[in-house]
Amino acid sequence: MRPEKLIIVTLCLLPLMWLVVRMSMERLGVSPVDTITSSTGHWAMRLIVATLAVKPLSKITGWNRLVSFRKSLGLLAFFYATLHLLTFVGLEYFFAVSLMVADAVRTPHIIIGFFTYMSMIPLAATSTRRWIKRLSPAGWNNLHRLVYISSFGALFHYYLQVKVVTTDLIIYAVLVIVLIGYRLIQYLYRAKPKGLPPKSP
Amino acid sequence: MKKQRPDSNIKSSEITDIDLYKSRREVLSTMAKIAAVTAAAMVFPPFVRMVSAQDNETEIGPFSKSSYSTDERANTYRDATTYNNFYEFGLGKDDPARNASMVEFRPWTVTIEGLVRKPETIDVDALIRKFPLEERIYRLRCVEAWSMVIPWIGFPLTDLVRRAEPMSQARYVEFVCLHDPLRMPGQRNPIIRWPYVEGLRMDEAVNPLTILAVGLYGKVLPNQNGAPIRLVVPWKYGFKSIKSIVSIRFVRDQPQTSWNLTAPHEYGFYANVNPNVDHPRWSQRSERRIGQLGRRKTLMYNGYGEYVAHMYENMDLRKFY
């Protein structure tokens, strides 16, 4: 792995390392499950935003190297999301599946959380070079637009479970809307190919 | 080579006045100290919290035991005093312990008013002295689906009601929390209409389980738990147990309570713990007991049905959530 990539991956794993350190010092607060769920959830969200920010940032800064980090950022987001899900199933419910399902079907944000996670699975699975080759560039790009669903899904998942709207919820929402909005605007104002016959009168 | 004669090249007007020089150095060193402490506090927030949970450990008593106490194991003092929903001090669970501990809550008066024959405005400590204290080890179930077992020290609200001599038109009791954005910085955030207001129907107010709490774990009530006096209604969701009470008013009509005003279809007036009536956005069938892994089934009326169910016999609890 190139040195810059190693640095990025290490930096992104620091939150997890800090959680483990706190766990060993029993400094996870009064409700450790709360703390772990919250931390893994927030970092998954932040890393999703980071992946969305790569393209616009590389265009603005002209630093094309950035795009090579997107795969790492995406996989790290999926990693934190997986930890978030495992904490929920394993630590919150202690694998009591029937109790969990009974609650989940009445709790919209849990259902949305599951679907959001599922939308991330194909993204992680097709992140390898092998799959990039297997799918046509257009096909791969189309599939990876699933990240828009993951982004709004994660946002909605968070929104549905807070009692009052918090600052970080607003920040995430603004970032997701701006970063996806940027792509929408680009799509709407894309250069039309020349040389085609004009539309019929 | 030209020799530099530093002294002669400096104009006297450019020499910093010695007092100004000293004070600037002080300012910089103070700023550096503040920055260092802030950085340390941000890196080691548990350290800061440990410091603040230690104050205010004055004993309270004497108090008698009560048969209404549960024999379930109580949570730790640290659990109860560092995991709080008290939005007047911030939205995080650790904010009240951090922001409330250093606040001064004396002198404090409580006003008993409204449709009563004996209204009064009384110093809170004088008020507390009038009632024998009991220890009530109660389950507290938050609407967010977590719970604790807390050994409160207090007296039955019915004793205070009797003292006030309510008139027959008084059918509800309204409680008001302190309104002071200076001491309670969270009140500068209009997420809830301040001050926090709660209420009980008269039969709920005089129910033997309802207490006004002034302490916990044998110690005076810490600020983050609603000092100096708060309500505890164990068969209802925690938001009904209003903290830091300044006014107890006896009224004819059902009071408009804060959470009901903020989100009317999510938080009702009765707010009885009920696993069969879900919150619109989450299930109420189970809860997380702080200090334990996994979840447990939520009990109807938080397990206090034998003392309270009769008050709701003919009520549709889905309608009166």
Image (cartoon, coloured by chain):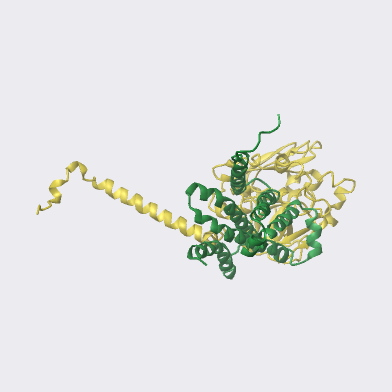
Chain colours: A green, B yellow
Q: Residue furthest top?
A: A201
Q: Nearer the viewer, residue A14 or A140?
A: A140
The answer to whether residue B231 is seen in the rendering is yes
- The residue sitting at the bottom extreme is A24
* Residue B309 pos. (x, y %): 86, 52
Q: Estimate the x, y position of residue A36 in percent, counting from the top left.
A: 63, 62
Q: Does A171 appear above or below A6?
A: above
How many dots with numbers? 0
Q: Quadrant of residue B148?
A: bottom right
Q: Quadrant of the C terminus of chain A?
A: top right
In this orientation, which residue lies closer to the viewer: A5 or B120?
A5
Q: Nearer the viewer, residue B136 or B74?
A: B74
Question: In this view, which residue lies farthest toward the right?
Answer: B314
Residue drawn at x 84%, y 46% is B318
The residue shown at (84%, 56%) is B305
Q: Is residue A30 visible?
A: no
Q: Give the image location of residue A173, x and y in percent.
A: 62, 46
Q: Is residue A184 above or below residue B295?
A: above
Closer to the camera, B101 or A47? A47
Image height check: is A60 above or below A31?
A: above
Residue A177 in the image, given as x and y percentages of width and height? 62, 44
Left or right position of B76 against B6: right
